[in-house]
Structures are given as structure tokens and as C-alpha cells.
Image (tube, rainbow, N blue to C red):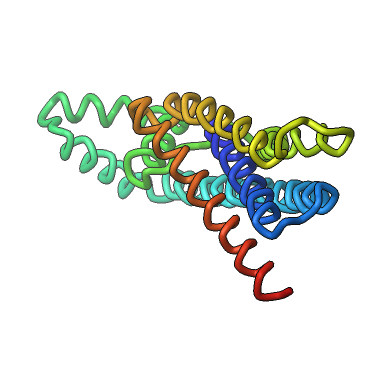
Amino acid sequence: MPEIVYGSMDGIVTTFAVVAGSAGAGFSINIVLILGMSNLIADGLSMSIGSYLSKKSELDNYKKHRRIEEWEVENIPDTERKEVEDIYKAKGFVGAELEMVVNRITSNKQVWVDTMMKDELNLILEKKSPFRAGLSTLVSFIIAGAIPLIVYVFAYSGSLGLHPFFLSSVVTLLAFLLIGYIKTYVTRIGLLRSLTETLVLGASAATAAYLLGDFLEKIIK
């Protein structure tokens, strides 16, 4: 879910910024579509590769430290047992209760290593594979990022009666609201705050891109 939400957010913000910058510069529909689609593919791949490498790095780090803990449990069990004892002593266990917990944990190598990974190193195995994380980011980025371009695709085929940038802004606004709503399930923040953050981020990026496009168009002429 986090990869889908943030992939969608990045996709729609960056593509809408390209559309806004192109509108500010007065580019034709053809140019907007070319720039928007190029950005969609290039940034989508970049984001997904980054997500893949990040998850893979976390997984490799987890596996490396787990091998170390397994070796230590196998070769220096007394030291590792003392570490378990210290961990649970810090949690408030004492006397016979502490000894019982330590004995129970150290009687099972798998549980012992799991305990060291979580309570000593604060490392938890990520269940989602790096490939799935990267693919989720790519798909969500492209789907959400295509939203600001939909109006331009129809405008390319014929007149819509209104300026395509205006219609694209309306459609994108609705998409921002939907993403902001979905984001509450990931961030656990209030709906109003999530919607506000999403709209402010999108509007700020689009406004900056539009003004920059307008400025550059004037000075480059």
C-alpha cells in the first residue's frame, strides 16, 4: 500500500507539473503529450528502480545481520544468552520470571535469533519482495501520472469546448482528493490534513512549473 500511494502521488504531481509548465509556456497539445508521456515513462522507471534498490538493500542488510546473529548463537551462546537476559531485564523481568523467559527463548534457535534481530538490532524482515515493491511503484506511478494527460489525449482528437489545461486541472484536482483520502489509510493522519497536504503539494508544484514556463517562454522569444 505505501508504494502504491506514494507512487501515485509522485506520478500525478510530476506529470501535472510538466503539463502546467507546458501550459505556461504556451506549448501545443502535441508537445504537451510528448513531454508528459516522456516524463511518465522516465520518472516512472526511475522511481520503481529506486524503490526496488531500496527494498533490496534493506533485505540484504537484514540477511547479513541475521547470518551474524546465527553464527554468534552457534559459537558464543553464553554471550548471546546474556544479551537476551539484559534485554528482558530492561523490560522489567526479574528473578525466576526472567530466567524462565530466557530459558524459553534460548531453547529454540529460530526464536533466539528472531529475538536478537528484533529486540537488539531493531530489524524486522520486510515481507514484500523488492520486485513487487518496484512493480507496484511503477504501475501506480504510470496510472496516476496519466490522469493529467487524459484530457490532452481527447483534445488531440478534437475540440473539447474548453481549454485543455483547465479541464486537466479539474480532473487532476479530483484525483488529488482521492489520493489524499487513500493516503489516510497509510499515514493514519486525519482526513482534512491529508487532503490539505496533497492539494498544497500538487498546487505548489503546478504553480511553480506554470510560472517558470511562462517566464522562460517570455525571455527565450
Which one is in front, 175 or 109?
A: 175
* Residue that lies at the very extreme toward the right in this rendered image: 157
* Residue that lies at the very extreme toward the left in this rendered image: 95
The residue depicted at 39 percent of the width and 50 percent of the height is 76
The residue depicted at 33 percent of the width and 27 percent of the height is 190
Q: Position of residue 77 (x, y in %)?
A: 37, 45
Q: How many discs mark residues in the rendered view? A: 0
- Residue 74 lies left or right of residue 146; in this view the side is left
The residue depicted at 58 percent of the width and 52 percent of the height is 57
- Residue 212 lies left or right of residue 122; in this view the side is right
Q: Position of residue 122 (x, y in %)?
A: 37, 43
Which one is in front, 15 or 74?
A: 15
Where is residue 145, by image quadrant? top right
Where is residue 26, by image quadrant? bottom right
Which one is in front, 67 or 143?
A: 143
Q: Position of residue 53 (x, y in %)?
A: 64, 51
Residue 64 visible in rendering = no
Where is residue 107, by image quadrant? top left
- Residue 59 lies left or right of residue 217; in this view the side is left
Residue 15, placed above or below residue 214: above
Residue 129 visible in rendering = yes
Q: Position of residue 221 (x, y in %)?
A: 73, 74
Residue 10, placed above or below residue 24: above
